[in-house]
Image: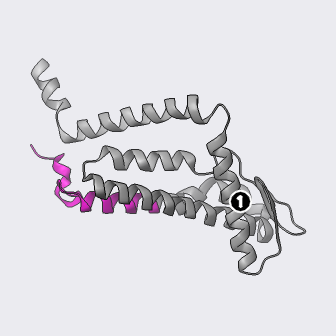
Amino acid sequence: MRNRIISYIKTPISVFFIKVGLIYGGWEILYQYFFLPDFWLDTWLSHVGVSMAAGILSFVGWDVESSARFVCIVGNRGIEVQNGCNGLDLLGLYAGLIIAYPGSTKKRIYFLGGGLFLLFLANVFRISTFVLTNYYAPQFMDMYHEYSSFIIFYPIVLTLWYFWIESGESQSFRSGFGFLSV
């Protein structure tokens, strides 16, 4: 019985999930005791995201007002980007998945840097679309807020993770990761 447990723990899928669990636990401890107490990272992500969204909307011709966490089209109700809606949790999840799955350090750094930057830009796009949804269809704001992450972030994360797996030196997605071998 003990040998079966040990052999199961050594399978690639078990090692992956153990790594993901440890990385997630580490991220939670880091977030709860380092980032959360003074909200510096959440605040920075919210402020920069709002500022960039306002800049993009202004660039394409909208008369926009923004301040700290708030952004609106002039004459309309604004939106506030609160902690938890600034993409930080998703950035941590994405980084954890890339770190947990085997691959070369050089590729990992590229995927982490590029992927985190792409997800940040996706959040800026999401903030911009909140402002436009609030202007054109405020009755759908709650629904859009609920489902926008599924529409915007998840396809990006899954696509990046797929490319990460396929670019690795180990077994690929199409081979079943070696998880299904008997």
- Judging by the rendered image, the residue that carries numbered circle 1 is 50
Which amino acid is tagged 1? Val
Q: Residue at x 75, y 53 (%)?
A: 69
How far from the left and from the top, in percent, is residue 117?
50, 60
Image height of 121 relative to 90, above or below: below
Report if residue 143 is visible in the image.
Answer: no
Where 161 sits versus 40, above or below?
below
**Place of residue 116 in the rendered image (x, y in percent of width and height, measured from the top left):** 48, 56
| Residue span colored magenta | 156-182
Residue 40, placed above or below residue 151: above
**Foreground residue among 150 and 15:** 15
Return the residue nearer the eye: 181 or 21: 21
Does the stretch in magenta take in 174? yes
Q: How many marks?
A: 1
Q: Is residue 3 above or below residue 138?
A: above
* Residue 37 lies within the magenta run: no
Task: Please state, as top left, top right, bottom left or bottom right, where the C terminus lies in the image.
Answer: top left
Evaluate whether residue 170 shows in this view: yes
> Which residue occupies the extreme bottom position in the image?
61
Q: Is 149 left, or right, of 166 in this rendering? A: right
Residue at left 68%, top 73%? 56
x and y, in percent, of residue 86 in the image: 63, 51
Main SS category, magenta section? helix
**Residue 23 falls in image quadrant:** top left
Closer to the camera in the image, 70 or 140: 70
Residue at 29 percent across and 47 percent down: it is 101
